[in-house]
Image: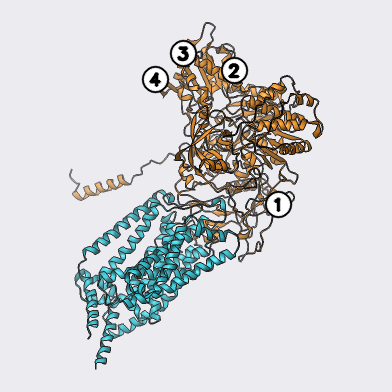
Chain colours: A cyan, B orange
Amino acid sequence: MSAAIAERMRSLDQTTEDALRPPRYGWAALVAVSLTCIAIGVYSWSLIIRFGMQYTGLNRPVGWGVLITDFVFWVGIAHSGTLISAVLFLFRARFRTAVYRAAEAMTVFGVMTAGLFPIIHLGRPWYAHWILPYPNQRHLQINFRSPLVWDAFAISTYFCVSAMFLLAGLMPDAAALRDGSQGLRRRFYALFALGWRGTAEEWRHHGRAYLFFAAFATPLVISVHSVVSWDFAVSIVPGWHSTLFPPYFVAGAILSGVAMVITLLIPIRRAMKLESIITLDHFDMLSRLVILTSLILTYSYSTEFLLALRAGPGPERDTLLYRATGAFWPFFWLMVLGNCVGPLFLFFKRVRGSLVGLFFVCVLVNVGMWLERFNIVVSSLEHNRVPFDWGTYHPRLVEIGITLGSFGWFFFWFLLFLKLLPAISVSELKEDAHHAALHEAAHAA
Amino acid sequence: MPGIGRRFFLKVVSATGVAAACSPSHAPEKLIPLLNPPENLVPGKPLFYRTVCRGCGAGCGVTARSREGRVVKLEGNPDDPISAGALCARGQAELQGLYAPDRLRGPLARQGDELKPLPWAAALAQLGGLLGKLRGSDGRIAGLRLLSRCEPGSAGAVQRSFASALGAAKNARVVFEPRDLASLRAANMKLFGRAELPVLALSRARSVVSFGADFLETWLSPVEQARGLMAGRGEPDRTRLTWISPRLSMSGANADTWLCTAPGEELQVALELLRWLLDPVNQVAALPPEAAAIRAALPPPRPLRGVSPEQVAHLGRELSLRRPSALLGPPASASGAEGRALAAAVQLCNLVLGNFGKSMQLGLGSELDAPSPEEDLYALLEEARRGEVTVLLLHRADPLGKLPASARVEEALRKVPLIVSLGERLDATARLAHFVLPDHHALESFGDLEPRKGMLALQQPVLSPLWDTRASSQVLLDLAAALKLPGIADKDFRELSKARWQAGAKALGAKLDTPQAQRDVQAQGVVVGHVEALQPALKLDGLAPLLFTKPSPAEGLHLVAFATALANADPEAPGWLREVPDVLTGVSWSSWAELSQATAQRLGVKTGDLLALSTDQGKAELAALISPALHDDAVAVPQDAPELRALGTPGRAVRLERTGKTFPLALTGRASQEGRDLARVIAEGGAPKREQGHEQGRTLVAPHEHPQHRWAMSIDLDKCTGCQACVVACYAENNLPVVGPQAAREGRLMAWLRIQRSVEKGASLEASRVALLPSLCQHCDAAPCEPVCPVYATYHTPEGLNAQVYNRCIGTRYCANNCPYDARVFNWEDPVFVEPLQMQLNPDVSVRSKGVMEKCTFCVQRIRFAEGTARDEGRPVRDGEVTPACVQTCPAQALVFGDAKDPKSRVALAQAESRGYRLLEEVNTLPAIAYQARRGGKG
């Protein structure tokens, strides 16, 4: 066994052991920060619940703002996980093995975050359940024509499937942790291991089931964000009403998701000393995905503008021009910089290969993608069909607090996951390493 | 105690503890039905009472709708020839005056520096004692003065007899009307020997010219005048309106031609117009015999600055051909010799054109009471300053709050040892009073009124007094009885008033023989007789000095005051009038100073900058607002602005300085259509252009079927004046909350119906046009709001209404985003109705809570009421029987409502008109509202 493979094996064992060790101070500090953010978010939301939406910056023309931006942003973040684990699994892209667990966890927590916003942004959130079709005495129906109902279905389906996918992949690793632990902790891991014993029969079923889930989850990657885009595309608001939106949103979601995966993996790799497992090659492959989706997005932006300009004078054109030149013009051009220009630098091997450069580009993409949603949501509403009502929207502290809270909520779960469960698929990587060792031995022989 | 174990004890303790913790914090109200329920009072059934509006001097008849003992809505009295069923915004808001939280709730008397509550009996006894001590040997008080608003009825009669019985001075009673058209009154006195205001019949005029007279806002009788002007609109040969003023006011926005004069130059224009009409060269037909004499009295011509002679000649030609016409002016703000001269010139034009007896009548003004000449008021103040006034009774008069600071009212009041204020609220003058004896609100009082000759309006209480108040006339009668004043035998004002109005009604030919006949007159609310108007005889002596002229004012900024239909600038006005944005500027909740674009640029001022204005009279700080329709030399301030008091009467030179501070003006709406042509204007005889490139009416889903009715509205933009009476009526009918200045700044006004404005810039300032568009829920057949609601909180009813179920709404706001008309309103917070304003709430309409979407319902409660009545009477709903609050109150009758399924209904006919179009046809929402484009005129 070569030194490299031995290093990989040791690192993998380390991961399993790390999960069983008491937490480090750095981790605890991060959790404390996350909890503080959550507290700020909860307090902000409580203000809205008690005193009404007057605490937001929303007004007569602008009915949706930062909260819906956050919703679309987090749904977008939730995209890459399934893409990386399911789609790439089906395409047999081996580089996924090292990164998919973290990506999947990100997906689940991303959906968990996104799913809060449709409730938070309601005028009467205590009646949020009315959006679900449940039998009731008053025979009240929900309106299946409304994209918001489609949203409820799409998001809940996506959450269930991605959570199952994550748990299915986790089973063997959880069993290993269970076997190495005692007491309460053992019972915790036993919950995730679902009685896994590692028999050949179990491995066979597991492989089949995993394939099935991958096949099942793949169309959801397309459908979820298409449905989210319909929130806008189905309306008749200039700047929203566009058939381009579904593919454009999906590409955007993948871009933001992959960028988020990279943004998270770079520090995790460093903190958990996974350099031998998550290698620069992995980042290289992910960077290519960023470039691809960024180019699709650039194309979509151009199409949107060209079509609007070609449509001649009218609300459509005015709204699009307003987006680029109106009250939030810096946001628009920052978005172009982050989503279209920044990723172009990844064509250079030097940037792609340097983790600092890559990290910087991906953070910029994340900012750009958030701004993209903000621009779409807000500028279109600010500039609707009746010029008398054209107005502006300025986010208020409460909305910023809730946004902060959503980041706290996301990272809280993610940190728990990093500490308690292996952030990489140990069993699969061990299998890979074992294969490599056998391969090496065969060569040596 | 034996038998109580530990466990049992704990059981009892916990049970009582739980019971105590769960007991309701409020004991339920006892609901015991009345043994003898009041007659006519059926819960849920409205009662209608007739009375008269005392909001201004016009005297519109009012129908008050009362529910369970509370009046909830005011509407015009359809039997009244002045209001004809309509009411202006201020009239609608009288209701909020009634329920105003700051109304006085009982008598107050001064104890040291403070006004302290006192029971009526004690207050009257104290006051009677003080008055008794002040009486001289002849039983009179030499220094007694009574200052009252104009009371052409029994109240005035009581005041006069009280003042003459107790007071010694000749002008012991002075009538003070701050908004009186004193100049016009004085000019009519000089010209025709009648100190009265004309009665206009604008429906007979083919051309109307207004010299800055806001005859659609507050001038004279706005409801009647709006109806008259707009009766001649909509048709191809429509009534033309020319507006002559430095500022394009709301009345001016309805004009075909605007002659933008320099401030104060209206007089020159009127004189030049008169000169043109009288010049034999111009061959104006049918000149009166006095023409030559008038011509001889005209002052020599002076050059005009803002207006060209061609424009005057053009107007003269129009007036000589289009007869009869009506020339109106000057506004209330015109004062002094100049104001009288303008009024005289205007009236002489009317005389020369033969308008008297046709579009304008003299001799109909009530002679029962009239505002005193300004001299009398200033004499009273002077006497007070000299310490000669010992008792000052104030009846609904607030000289300190209304007169300019230069009148030194406070100094005068401080010298008066006994001031008694008989009013509704603690206004500036009442704060200095020694006794404050609160009067009933007009809607709580008995009384009678002669708005004009040949008419008698009954003032009848529509609810029992809310507070411990007493009718001022009754207070005077009580004092008279206590002081045993000679010549005042009446003890009860109600009886006195009844005797008077019955005598008056009999004189007008009403039959009052039986109690039923009396009740019928009371139910009618108004008695109308016939009085011939006078053909005024011109008094030629003193004509030349009356037509005083001075050189056109020098260049430089001058103060201009303008009236608004609402009262955004008046801090004492009720919430509705302050919150509904001014129709031309969008300002609510504050006063402002308008500057033209060029002036603002020259001074480097932006909208919202706080300006320091100073005149020779004083200084004031006002927020700047850049106006697209104002003469460069004008600084225009709303007439209601309290700051105007410091600056003195308008017309004087004003200096502007920036303070460096800004003022957060609450501004609503952008005054531009961005070329989208929402409020359309068509050339005379033309039809509005249709949207191209889309197939109107084609939908994927089959259109709705409406088995019985399809409620629809038609809005004639040629008739809409922009007065916003409809908006205020909507607030009243539909329980819309007043949200205050901060929410207004944030774009969170709750109005369901708004008048959208846009200023279409022409080649010159005068060529600018203001387009107004009443905008409300369009009740689309293919409503974009309906499919996007996840919970069916909004849906299409079988009668074509786009309904909103507040209880079902969860507040996604998706519907509002998707509404192309921005017609939907979200409740950003729980509504607040300050006690006792909640008593005005219409019980037929629910009060919405925070987090819920709402919008215009076409007043579904009124539709249901009419349908219910029709069903009870076993007949179909008649056309015109259903009127939403906005349609009901529209003085111009620009709005028509009805069933579009009935091809003969007024709304169906109006919708089929050639000027008709729908808003945003390209979105294919199939709205239920059709607009009729405004006619452009030739100007």
Chain bearing mark 1 = B
The amino acid type found where label 4 is placed reads Gly
As measured in the structure, the alpha-carbon distance from the residue carrying label 2 to the one carrying label 4 is: 32 Å
Q: Which residue is nearer to you in this view: B888 or A424?
A: A424
The amino acid type found where label 1 is placed reads Arg
Q: Residues within 10 Å of mark 2 (few under 14, many from 20)?
A: some
The residue pinned by badge 3 equals B129
* Left or right of B691, for residue A256: left
As measured in the structure, the alpha-carbon distance from the residue carrying label 1 to the one carrying label 3 is: 71 Å
Say whether disc 1 or disc 4 marks the residue closer to the N-terminus. Answer: 4
Quarter-of-image position of residue A172? bottom left
The tag on residue B112 is 4
Whether the residues at callouts 1 and 4 have beta carbons within 8 Å, the answer is no
Chain bearing mark 4 = B
Q: Residues within 10 Å of mark 1 (few under 14, many from 20)?
A: many
- The answer to whether any part of residue B449 appears in the image is no
Whether the residues at callouts 2 and 1 have beta carbons within 8 Å, the answer is no
Say whether disc 2 or disc 4 marks the residue closer to the N-terminus. Answer: 4
* Left or right of B680, for residue A152: left
Q: Position of residue B244 (x, y in %)?
A: 66, 36
Q: Residues within 10 Å of mark 3 (few under 14, many from 20)?
A: some
* Left or right of A137, for residue B762: right
Whether the residues at callouts 3 and 2 have beta carbons within 8 Å, the answer is no
For the point 38% across and 50% down, the residue is: A47
**Which residue lies most toward the left here?**
B2
The residue pinned by badge 1 equals B915
Say whether disc 3 or disc 2 marks the residue closer to the N-terminus. Answer: 3
Quadrant housing the N terminus of chain A: bottom left
The residue pinned by badge 2 equals B160
The amino acid type found where label 3 is placed reads Gly
